[in-house]
Amino acid sequence: MRSQVRSTIAKKTMPQPPPSPGIIPLPQAINKYFELSLYLLVLMGFGALASTGGLDVPTILLVGASLALRGFLLAERRRVVISERWTTPLTIAYFVFYAADYFLLSRGFLAATVHLVLFAVVVRTFSLRRDRDYVTLAILAFLMVLASAVLTVDSIFLFFFAGFMLMAVATFILMEMRRSQRTAKFQARHSNDAHEHRHLAFALARTTPGLVLMMLAGAAAVFFLLPRMSAGYLGGYSFGNDLSTGFSDRVRLGSIGQIQQSNSVVMHVQINGDRHGQYALHWRGVALANFDGKNWSNPRDQFILQRQTDGAFSVPISSQGVALAYDGRRQAAPETNPHLIHYRVLLEPIGTNIFFLAPWGRRLMGTYRALGVDAGGAVYDLDSQHAVNVYEADSDIAKPSAADLRTAGNSLPQFVSSYLELPTLDPRIPRLAAQISGSASNNYDKAAALEIYLKTHYGYTLQLLRAPVADPLANFLFERKQGHCEYFASSMAVMLRTLHIPSRVVNGFRSDEFNDVTGNYVVRANNAHSWVEAYFPGYGWITFDPTPGGDVATPQGWDRAMLYLDAAQSFWREWVISYDSSHQYILGHAALNGTRNSWERSRTWARLHYARLLNLVRRGQRSAEQAPTRWFWGVGGITFLVLLLGNMGRIARMIRVRRLQAHPERSPDEAAAMWYERMAGYLARRGVKKSTTQTAQEFVRVIGDERLRLRVGRFTDAYESARFGNSSNDAQRLPELYEEVELASKK
């Protein structure tokens, strides 16, 4: 017995013969696919990071070129490894550069750390020697995905994350196979299957997506069902950018023009009852009162808004109050005001704590603990734990008629005196204002004349000035005669003040793009806008927009297709990034109502169709009694069709077996496998059973009957030649050899 055990161990541990030419050994295939999946894992991580827009162009080019070189080397099956003598000095040198990057170049911890991770990725990609190097590279790929999650809330991150998850599962499966293969005490025999590595690839391609889908399904269940805190994305943290500079309490002339260079989405607005985009509204951000010739600014005083019993914040509407929106004659009750609109805003994290509202805001609702309002009517978020992201509001968009405004008096209240102050002006500006408004007899017609003049006599351009000028307004009005909205609004506001009409500049957005797929207005950075508000006693602040407008075309073709992408991004932003307890309540309530409604519809349908179904059954019963033969054949035919459809797979296999038996030369390998399975099954029924651990040749050697062993050996030789050598002649011989095996087993 011991000698048999020693013989078996020696047989399994003895050196195995090399595989046939053209066959890739399984260990080599595992290493090949492991390195490929790890490379794709890193590529997905870098793609997610690059798609955030937070990387500078040189970094993208350098890291992208390094990864492209790595991919080329993998495709060519060439291995380039940085010497260990260079790896350590390079790492030390970069840590010195990291300090310079942090204090001088990036000037931010996050950006400098991202650069450090990318450098480590490049170095580690070309210095893979040990298992720990591969694990380190996988961890660095995860850090890139983590950094991209911090830098963006865009839905494109979802696609890269899904790809990263797919590659991560494949990588760690192959990593475990690789580790197990190296630590195994017994080495498997080399297979003669030329497509063994392909079978491995197909198995991974089938298994990996299934595992990823199960993980995502479990994560989605946890994400949507567990209790949520209403903290919003990254809580109170936000990353400032050019957008925030246009909506602060001090704005340099030209800041809005810089914002308008971008086409990125800033917010989505959904107005109740509006499915066709019937509104063209201005969304007020900050109103600016003081002008020094180059900068607009605003007093820093803010007043706390009071929360009502229903949780909403009420915005003051008295012209004598702090918000200075409009006066008491427009204080109609909400239930009787036809001009009151309710809307919902989904704001991207643009680094500002201002709520953008349609004029004039009456109520604001959201998960915010404290709000403030300034003298210009701008509403601020004072809750550091809840960044501005999703909120609802009511606004009164009623406008007094031109006839009413023409009757407004000239007696101004004391609080508007700051809206008449002027810096030192070019003397041509007040002369131009007087010239334009000379024929007007009231303040409204004067303001309207200035608005029309600027719209028709000046051109609109987003091309910024190459160099600062001493007097931007004089340069715009008398020399350049073209500019963007800030120059139009600032010029009108200043000229109104020269005519003793209180005015201010308002920075915000205007909405002219409507997505009829979602019913939302899509507001982009290039919709950033400046306009003018002029004060009329008894009516409050009235909007004027002197900037020439462009034609808004209905989206067609590719632009139409982009509406669906915007719909997907809007869903991602609201139901994933901004998902909180309120969304959880809405989702649960909708699911409960949907289930209840489906049940009620089913019951209603059953009640309505019960009599009809009962009559149908009774007619069928009478028909069966009158013509039993016809019903017998009808029921028999239906039963036959059901059985036929239920056994289609088995019938198809039988047809294929028949074809292989008749023409084995068409697919020698499949015919060989079929005949060998049939032969092994026949011998098992005769008492000669093949073990699953035995190879075909080992099975031949254990057959005791010499005559049968000879016949099975001849059959096995032909089988292997047809199965692995694709020999048509041997495949055609298998039926004859099978009959010989049958005859030998019966004797």
Image (tube, grey):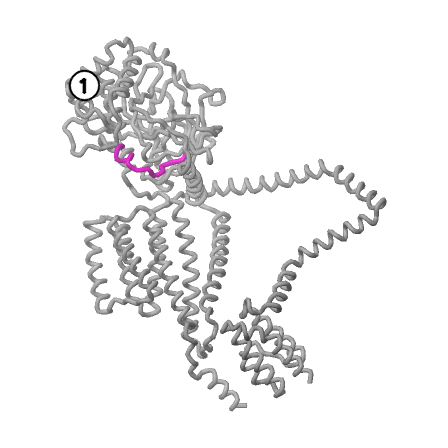
Question: As rendered, which of 643 and 656 lies closer to the eye?
Answer: 656
Question: Which quadrant holds residue 364?
Answer: top left
Q: Give the residues in magenta.
A: 256-268
Q: Which quarter of the figure is the C terminus placed in?
A: bottom right
- Count of numbered labels shown in the rendering: 1
Rendering coords of residue 59 (x, y %):
26, 52
- Looking at the image, the residue that sits furthest to the front is 729
The amino acid type of the residue labelled 1 equals: Ile
Question: Which residue is the site of mark 1?
Answer: 429
Question: As rendered, which of 589 and 125 lies closer to the eye?
Answer: 125
Question: Which quadrant holds residue 437?
Answer: top left
> Is residue 29 a member of the stretch shown in magenta?
no
Question: As rendered, which of 524 and 565 lies closer to the eye?
Answer: 565
Q: What residue lies at 43% left-to-right and 57% top-to-bottom?
A: 166
Question: Which quadrant holds residue 571?
Answer: top left
Rendering coords of residue 650 (x, y %):
64, 62
Q: Which quarter of the figure is the N terminus placed in?
A: bottom right
Q: Can residue 745 be seen in this view?
A: yes
Categorize mark 1 by other alpha carbons within 10 Å: few (<14), some (14-19), many (20+): some
Relative horizontal placement of residue 264, taking residue 576 as reference (left or right): left
- Looking at the image, the residue that sits furthest to the right is 626
Rendering coords of residue 24 (x, y %):
42, 71
Q: What residue lies at 29% left-to-right and 41% top-to-bottom?
A: 240
Q: Is residue 483 above or below residue 160?
A: above
> Is residue 265 a member of the stretch shown in magenta?
yes
Rendering coords of residue 594 (x, y %):
58, 40
Q: What residue lies at 49% left-to-right and 59% top-to-bottom?
A: 211
Q: What element carries label 1?
A: helix
Q: In this view, does 79 lie above or below 326?
A: below
Q: Is residue 694 visible?
A: no
Relative horizontal placement of residue 360, taking residue 103 as reference (left or right): right
Q: Is residue 404 above or below residue 316?
A: above
